[in-house]
Amino acid sequence: MNEPVGERAFKYHGLGNDFVVLDRRPSGRDIGPSESVQLCDRRLGIGADGVLALLPSPGAAARMVVHNADGSIAEMCGNGIRCAVKYLLDRGHGQERPPSVDVDTGAGRLRCDVTYGADGRVSEVEVSMGPARLQAPNLPGPDRFIQRELPGAPGVRGTAVSMGNPHLVLFGQPIATAKDLGPKLEVHPLFPDRTNVEFVELLGPRELRIVVWERGVGFTQACGTGACATAAAGVVEQRLPSGEWITAHLPGGPLQVRVAPDLSDVRMRGPAAFVFEAELP
């Protein structure tokens, strides 16, 4: 008697920021919070920072829904979209190797340019992440929050940036304070939907180090939208040049980011890697 066949789950990571990819394009059915929590559990599930549910979307390769490890949904994920593109192109196009692909996200439709390795598989993805916004419903308002002190956190000054999802970028705040400050600032009342928090150290005119406390996840090895928000904040605060590639060093490795002078377009490029696939019960 044949055993029933379960759903295939695919594990990917972008610089150590890891995801379970579920291809739900045939059914069009998303997962719920409890399923995300179960899959992301590192002892009782597959283990990941999030689940990427790929759903059908007319005119795009897929719609990517980002489920955090705590069951909440993120509008966008820079490392996640690179992993999604690698899955879609490595597994869905046979011998075809398109130079770019569109993916729909909570932050809009994003164009992803692809570099292939010697094995014919995706090795690097460059994403047009859209604009960096200083005013958005998920940021403090009504005015722009630039290098301002946070109420209830004396001496902590930051800049709020939306890459579809909210970020609080802290230049000069010692990275050693991230463990204590990160979880407190994530839920700061100024941010209606909570926020990601970036602790940043400048290493040079085009180089920086970032540690990210990610909303709904905690510390992660890398955060693509966090690197983009940090670069945008650096341009606004006149710490970093616009229109040039800068290197953002994260615990899992470096990402390259370029910010338009008017913040109208932020581009990010970096690797994505396949880990394993499994059959779910």
Image (cartoon, rainbow, N blue to C red):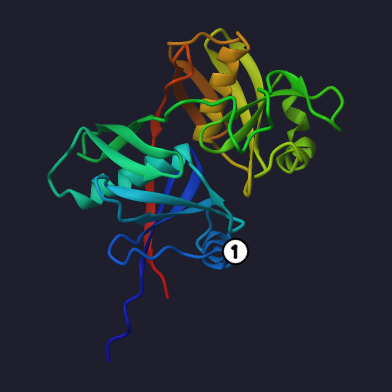
Element type at marker 1?
A: loop
Whether 125 is drawn above or below 73: the answer is: above
Give the total of numbered labels: 1
Label 1: few (<14), some (14–19) or many (≥20) C-alpha neighbours in 10 Å:
few
The quadrant of the picture occupied by the N terminus is bottom left
| 238 on left or right of 179 | left
Residue 178 at x, y percent in the picture: 74, 34
User: Which residue sits at x=63%, y=12%?
Assistant: 237
**The quarter of the displayed image where residue 186 is located:** top right
User: Which residue sits at x=47%, y=11%?
Assistant: 261
Query: Looking at this rendering, what residue extends furthest in the left direction?
Result: 95
Residue 137 at x, y percent in the picture: 60, 37
Residue 139 at x, y percent in the picture: 64, 34
Residue 220 at x, y percent in the picture: 59, 41
| Residue 93 seen in the current view | yes
**The quarter of the displayed image where residue 243 is located:** top left
Whether 161 is drawn above or below 277: the answer is: above
Whether 190 is drawn above or below 40: the answer is: above
Which one is in front, 18 or 242? 242
User: Which residue sits at x=33%, y=42%?
Assistant: 103
